[in-house]
């Protein structure tokens, strides 16, 4: 019952958790803020210990932390695939290295049948 009450706002019809505009000057648009992909230093899916709901936490190069509530609608594997496919190609080199240490591409290949495509940024 407790988790259901915390998750109810996620079931509003038409609710959008975040929008990703994948390109060279792309952005991640959350309900309360907008983050340039080039400004992302670290991105992670973290479980909130109070309400047991996963939050996407984005740390930027200007020392801001943006939390995006997922209402447990976004699975861990789906999160990894979305970030790797749409955000990773446009991140800075340092942020890419951090992401590569977090992600296990072999495990994603087995579980989600995902293979990273080589992206050419023009």
Image (cartoon, helix red, strand yellow):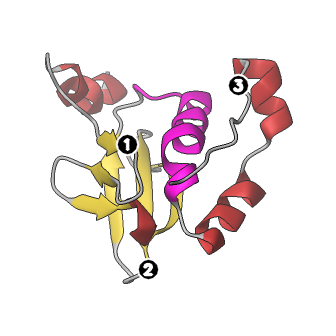
Q: What residue do we see at 53% from left, 43% from top?
A: 83
Q: Is residue 39 above or below residue 62?
A: above
Q: CA distance from mark 3 to mark 1?
A: 30 Å
Q: Which residue is mark 2?
A: 61
* Proximity of marks 3 and 2: CB atoms separated by less than 8 Å: no
> Which element type, helix, strand or loop, lies under badge 2?
loop
* 69 left or right, relative to 105: left
Q: Is residue 50 above or below residue 37?
A: above
Which residue lies at the image location 31% right of the left edge and 54% below the top edge? 27
The residues tagged by marks 2 and 1 sit, at their Cα atoms, a distance apart of 28 Å
3 or 1: tag closer to the N-terminus: 1
Is residue 87 rendered magenta in the image? yes
Is the stretch drawn in magenta largely helix, strand or loop?
Answer: helix
Between residue 107 and residue 118, name the one nearer to us.
Answer: 118
Viewer-nearest residue: 92 or 40: 92
Question: Which residue is disc 1 drawn over?
Answer: 51
Q: Quadrant of residue 61?
A: bottom left
Q: Horizontal placement of 65 versus 115: left or right?
A: left
Label 3 packing within 10 angstroms: few (<14), some (14-19), many (20+): some
**Residue 119: where, in percent of width, then height?**
62, 44
Residue in the picture at 30% in, 62% down = 35
Q: Residues within 10 Å of mark 2 (few under 14, many from 20)?
A: few
Residue extent of the magenta highlight: 73-90
Q: Residue at x 50, y 54 (%)?
A: 122
**Left or right relative to 120: residue 54:** left
Disc nearer the start of the sequence (2/1)? 1
């Amino acid at each position: 019952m407790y988790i259901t009450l915390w998750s109810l706002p996620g079931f509003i019809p038409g609710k959008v958790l975040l929008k990703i505009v994948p390109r060279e000057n792309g952005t991640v648009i959350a309900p309360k803020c907008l983050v340039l992909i080039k400004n992302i230093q670290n991105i992670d899916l973290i479980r909130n210990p109070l309400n047991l709901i996963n939050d996407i936490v984005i740390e930027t190069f200007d020392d801001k932390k943006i939390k995006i509530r997922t209402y447990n609608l976004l699975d861990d594997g789906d999160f990894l695939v979305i970030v790797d496919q749409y955000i990773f190609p446009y991140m800075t080199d340092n942020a890419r290295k951090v992401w590569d240490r977090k992600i296990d591409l072999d495990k994603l290949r087995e579980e989600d049948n995902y293979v990273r495509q080589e992206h050419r940024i023009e």
